[in-house]
Image (cartoon, grey):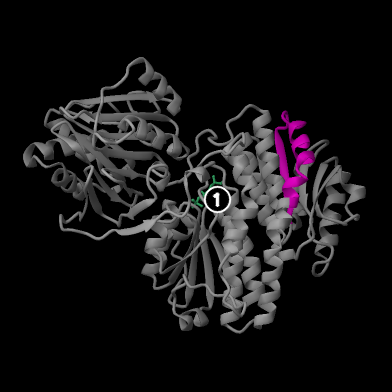
Amino acid sequence: MCGIVGYVGSQVASDHPLDVVLEGLRRLEYRGYDSAGVALVSPDGRLSTAKKAGKLANLVEELDLRPLPESTAAIGHTRWATHGGPTDVNAHPHVAGKLAVIHNGIVENFASLKAGLVADGVEFVSETDTEVAAQLIARAYESTGDLTAAMTEVARSLHGTFTLLAVHEDAPGLVVGARHDSPLVVGIGQGENFLGSDVAAFISHTKEALELGQDQVVTITPDTVTVTGFDGLPAEARRYTVDWDAAAAEKGGFASFMDKEIHDQPHAVADTLLGRTDAHGRLVLDEVRIDESVLRSVDKIVVVACGTAAYAGHVAKYAIEHWCRIPVEVELAHEFRYRDPVVNERTLVVAVSQSGETMDTLMAVRHAREQGAKVLALVNTHGSTIPREADAVLYTHAGPEIAVASTKAFLAQITAAYLLGLYLAQLRGNKYADEVGEILIELRAMPDKIQQVLDRADRVRQTARSMVDTSSVLFLGRHVGFPVAMEGALKLKELAYIHAEGFAAGELKHGPIALIEEGQPVFVIVPSPRGRDSLHSKVVSNIQEIRARGARTLVIAEDGDTDVLPYADEVFYVPQSPTLLAPLLAVVPLQIFACELATAKGLDVDQPRNLAKSVTVE
Ligand code: M6R
């Protein structure tokens, strides 16, 4: 939530710092789009700012009308509003005298701090918590004459979550940042340096980055990067090279990032599988640096995650329990954290997150570790906080996901969860190497099958376009089809603002069937007829039951499944696959359906209303 960019460049820099910051904001706009603003300090020490409610385009228009002077240091912000509505006045940066500040997070003790400042005669113009921080840093600067020292002093006094960046008229060649429970990375350039909420902010300028730790302050000048702790002492930050380039964060000819990311999915799955076996075909997860004896003694796995990542966790439950015979619980991270869960040193907590910054998930990770559990993070974004605080990480390799609605990260998370399940099964002796090898062969065939689903998607799009006036869609699934149904409903809600619910098909007769009336569209995810037990026939019966009550049935079934034909108004076939792997295929038509329907309604699928990509506040 909120995107932050900072830049300092010497005069040799080819770009105007304002352009660098605006480009960074364009790449970070997915983090929040309620308002945007910039602050610049010119070499002769003049502070200028511009800010505007609404999307970044409004700020750019404002800057065309009222250009800002040349500068060597600049900061920029794109906002997801917390304190104070999305207005020009509440937009960042916030100015206090000669200083400008931008902020991501929430300063929880702002009211008491503000009361103290008001009592001292300070007048506030906005309703934000950020302006309080700005006033405090400006005062601290007056007494120290040092922006880094001022930032450090104030950072120590704030409670809550924050990344703060500041520039000051009297310190024209530098930007200072501080982070506590909110993301901030440094981009290392030649004669220029960058700060960003994530590496997308500066990826077209440098791939060399520094991952800041918790409670650190960073000061960048064109030629130096200095990192200290909140105690003022020098601190270490991990240097790494970003493994994707600017093209990966562009639309690449697609109408939206979401459309592009849906089409990236075969690669996301293939890349997540890549390089994870040794010369003998044995699964090797080098990153999982938790002692093998600890993994063998685990007697319970708890998956913690939010939103789409939690649905990936539900798929993981079916696979891991089946392959490893370890009980798996899946819990929304915000519920886990606040209900005194039973976890101990024999529990493996798996935290699933695309961004690696979701505050609810981070808090669950901390709580689990405090209880003695080992935490394994399944995360997509390198340099993020959750992997740094976990005991080990298994990275998904989906590449940058820019659209607010998660798609390729979901498939990559499911894939990584399969790898984890197979690894544990191999390690604990639940499966022989050749059994694991056979499943890996099936898994490696999935990217081609996902591509086939993409190639056949025209009918899904047509159906979506014909449903722009629909006010409610239901989704039914059993077994691994249940999380797919919930994910299909979430995609439709967040993109098309249509009421949608996902149900376990077996639950239908316990209540939800009362919702069925003439014409009610219902997607049904049908398991493979080649799968176990009577799962398939049970779901076919469910289709009959809702059809008999007037539902319009939109069925996702496996190639060759003719049993569904008599009861389906539409069938969208996907290639055959083992039941446990089928979510990687079945969810794709649902993503395309939601994307197309929202687009047909004229909505912005990349930046749906009220949402932000990374939920970095609780
Ligand atoms: O970055 P994370 O995977 O931790 O994010 C979790 C959820 O906020 C995220 O999946 C959200 O539900 C998406 N908007 C779903 O499309």
- When asked about the image quadrant of residue 129, the answer is top left
Relative side of 558 to 414, left or right: right
Residue 471 painted magenta? yes
Q: Residue furthest right?
A: 566
Percent position of residue 341, x then y: 46, 66
Residue in the foreground of this view, choosing between 269 and 404 = 269
Instruction: Answer yes or no: is residue 338 visible.
Output: no
What residue is shown at x 76% (from left), y 62% (from top)?
577
What residue is shown at x 44% (from left), y 34% (from top)?
26
Q: Residue furthest top?
A: 65
What residue is shown at x 61% (from left), y 84% (from top)?
429
At label 1, counting other C-alpha atoms closer than 10 Å, the crowd grade (few under 14, some 14-19, many 20 or more) is some
- When asked about the image quadrant of residue 271, the answer is bottom right
Relative side of 39 to 512, left or right: left
Q: Is residue 583 above or below residue 368?
A: above
Residue 176 painted magenta? no
Percent position of residue 509, x then y: 78, 53
Residue in the foreground of this view, choosing between 346 and 454 = 454
On the image, numbered disc 1 is attached to which residue?
307
The residue stretch that appears in magenta: 452-477
Q: Is residue 442 above or below residue 436?
A: above
Instruction: Answer yes or no: is residue 405 visible.
Output: yes
Q: Is residue 300 above or below residue 582?
A: below
Label 1: which secondary element: helix
Mark 1 close to ligand 1, CB under 8 Å: yes
Relative side of 549 to 403, left or right: right
